[in-house]
Image (cartoon, coloured by chain):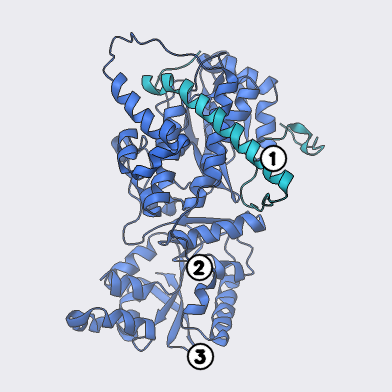
Chain colours: A blue, B cyan
Amino acid sequence: MNAKNAHSSSFRDPSGYVFVDNGDIKRVIYPVYFKQYKALNDSDFFKTLFENELLIPHKELTNTDKEVVIKAEKISFVTYPYEWSFNMYKEAALLTLKLQKYSLEQGFSLKDASAFNITFHNGKAIFIDTLSFDFYIENTPWRAYKQFITHFFGPLLLAHYHGAQQLKLMSNFIDGIPVKMISSMLPFKTRLSPILYSNIHLLAKLENKHNEDYKGETKVASLSKKGQLNIIKSLYDYIKNLELKEHSEWGNYYDKINYTDDAFMQKSEIINTWVNTIKPECLIDVGGNDGTFVRKLNSSAKTSLVCDIDNNAVDFNHKIMKLNKEQFMLPFVLDVLNPSPSIGLNNKERDSFLNRIKELAPDVTLALAVIHHMSLSGNVPFSESAKFFSTFSKHLIIEFPKREDSWVQRLLNAKGDFKDHFDFYSLDNFISEYTNTFEIIEQKEIEDSKRVIFLLRKK
Amino acid sequence: MYFLYFDPGLGAMIIQTIIAAVAGVVLFSKNLMHKIKVFLGIAKPIQDDVFDDIEIKDSDIENNNSSER
């Protein structure tokens, strides 16, 4: 393979590779995939998927008998499976099944079903691996079936039974969670469900039995198209009805926090004015909950990233985004104290959160009601949190709850004997540490609350 | 032609026949139950706004000829 600056994640598939050219995402297709590519073009397969916004659109740039080069629409910020909330994960799983069903009907089949083939773009899950479609051969089973189980069905089931935190396992198991492990982690009662027994437990058993067959002596079974469609439909129905047990009411989160209605309005007015002077194309709200604040902005930002550590908040944001058909919103799960690392081959296959956000460089970062959690729950000194915020955007709008704030008091009291260690937590210290990295453009007290809000610019 | 660049799992290929049979029975009985419930008037209305159906509409969604692709 003579791949010139191939993207570090694009080495598995021999049909071609992705490369970045002046910020554009391009894809080289090798002759080995020409037949498939032509058939997909001629049958309007690609066109239908583009129109339904299920596959990332591309345009053909060059077409020779050595290679075809296509240019794909750019995705502003790629999120990975371990950054999705439960329902985002569900949407991605359903999209994969939907594509496989459609492919089968058109005489194609997905040759892989990796969760990394999907990301979120314009408010929807979208398939990004254009070369994943191959010809369907009559009466063959789906070769990506096991991958679907280990990348999608397994993680979703684990999240259903043990909580959404399980979805983070994917950052350790880049090639899917082993079936045996899924099977061992599911409660006994799942053996009584025909769908779960056959798709997980029986699969684990058979995989175990056949992984000793090095000579390939076992006869490969045949499976009719109708049979395969049955598997896909039954998984689709099952996953569609799968829910988290832990669902809490994030809808009324803002009733629980320390804002009178007036203060809340005032806060959003201040932020609105500031954001409008910056006129961002792109912004990120760190600890942005369910996106309430970003939705209150009347800015023209094309992309608004809203991340939160709480899966339920992100899930709620995802739901609102879907119901309102919002294109600018991009919710994802992120722990600022432990952002997603770079993983995979050479530690380059999937990029870290920091690298991706640095590349995106949002025009403004909102950090509302976050600093006390970072400083008090996470023991992060002001100098360190300032360093974090200064790495990716020029402007920072940050809210500082003073020591007297009841939330701060609650966090401090929880520290018990260790409380004195946090004497550094004061407005003066905050200002003196942050002004090492940032300059203060504006600073406003929010009336009726013990909070101050700052507009800062990187020095 | 398939590119065998990852291991599909031999067990996983064989087992799909069994899973398909199970899935067929489950789908059939669910369908039947739904029909019975509709007949008795106790079927729940479909209220899922967020996730749509598995079907993908063919090009007839809109007469969108402006698309250059």
Q: Disc 3 marks which amino acid?
A: Glu
Disc assigned to residue A67: none
Q: In what element is the residue under mark 1?
A: helix
Q: Is residue A231 left or right of residue A157?
A: right
Task: Identify the image quadrant of the C terminus of chain A.
Answer: bottom left
Q: Residues within 10 Å of mark 3 (few under 14, many from 20)?
A: some
Kind of residue indicated by mark 2: Trp
Q: Position of residue B67 (x, y in %)?
A: 75, 36
Q: Which mark is residue A250?
A: 2
- Mark 2 lies on a secondary structure that is helix
For residue B66, say whether it is visible.
yes
- In percent of width and height, residue A341 lies at 32, 49
Q: Which mark is residue A447?
A: 3
Distance, label 1 to label 3, CA atoms, is 60 Å
Q: Residue at x 41, y 39 (%)?
A: A192
Count up the numbered dots: 3
Residue at x-position 56% and y-position 69%: A292
C-alpha gap between disc 2 and disc 1? 36 Å
- Residue A326 visible at all: no
Question: Label 1, on which residue?
Answer: B35
Q: Percent from the top left, x then y, of residue A417?
A: 17, 82
